[in-house]
Image (cartoon, helix red, strand yellow):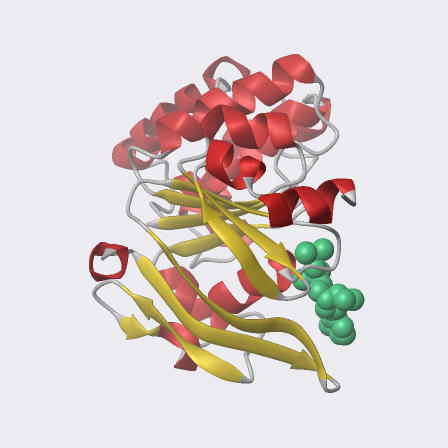
Amino acid sequence: QKASEALLSLKHISVEFDGFKAVNDVTTSIAPHEIHFFIGPNGAGKTTLLDVICGKTKPAGGEAYYAGVGNILKLKEFEIVKKGICRKFQVPSTFINLSVYDNMRIAINRDKSVFGSLMMRKRYLDTKKIYEVLHLVGLDKKSKERAKALSHGEKQWLEIAMLLVEEPKLLLLDEPVAGMGQPETEKTARILEEIKDRCSVAVVEHDMNFVKSIADEVTVMHEGAILTEGSAEDVMKNEKVQEVYLGR
Ligand code: ADP
């Protein structure tokens, strides 16, 4: 059903670390323009699954079919990025002493060196795209500020903006609202809802209120395997999920 129209279709993915199955026979798919959450207790295999999608970890078995490309598991990490799958890690990746705008210039010229991209003459179309994306994340009026002057939330949004100028088809996010207060969490939700017009978003997340507020699809993982999938409402009603989360 869904698999035929999927942007990314994972089939029987397994990852082993010294014989331990961190991901165990996972089959699921990510549709175009959806916000797809991966939730579950610590150690469930969520991060490892994102690592497989972006090519950082090679699975022991399985396939990952990406629309218009085919099985991406044979590709190297940088090749997967070039095909439009971009990952934001929890560790910061901005240049804190550079301005918001210069960080964006570096991101838009990812194929050049940092120095080279800053030396390049400003191209009209790049500037237009940079400001359009900064506007989306609410940072267009802070373009001249140094990254280190931004709030925690603004830094996260800048990192998302730095990925968006590369025009990804699939954005992978690791706990994007970690450390954020309520207003910043809500703003992040609005940003992701706007982003999904452009691409699909796969998110590893613990904050269930955040998940409920914007999820199109939720995959619940437990001990490396998928426990259940569906709408946030449906998976939270699931007995097995309640057992895992509430110990019932
Ligand atoms: P989650 O993101 O759901 O918390 P992870 O994907 O980080 O879970 O981890 C799944 C399991 O795999 C955990 O038991 C973790 O200790 C183990 N694991 C993850 N990465 C490695 C690694 N590089 N080497 C060995 N074990 C790992």
Residue 155 lies in quadrant? top right
Q: Give the tally of numbered discs.
A: 0
228 up-or-down from 124: above or below: below
The x and y percentages for residue 62 are 45, 79
Whether residue 40 can be seen here: yes
Out of 109 and 246, give the one closest to the viewer: 246
Farthest right residue in view: 247
Left or right of 38: which side holds 80? Answer: left
Q: Residue at x 43, y 37 (%)?
A: 231
Q: Give the x, y percent position of residue 166.
A: 38, 47
Percent position of residue 8, x then y: 34, 60
For residue 120, what is the image quadrant? top left
Q: Quadrant of the C terminus?
A: top right
The quadrant the N terminus occupies is bottom left
- Determine if residue 146 is in view: no
On the rendering, which quadrant does ligand 1 occupy?
bottom right
Instruction: Say above or below: 62 vs 95.
Output: below
**Residue placed most toward the observer, 79 or 241:** 241
Residue depicted at 45% across the width and 58% down the height = 112
- Residue 175 location (% of width, % of height): 64, 41
Q: Residue at x 71, y 49 (%)?
A: 244
Measuring 54% from the left and 18% from the top, which residue is drawn there?
Answer: 187
Is 45 placed left or right of 126 in the picture? right
Residue 169's place in the image compared with 123, above or below, is below
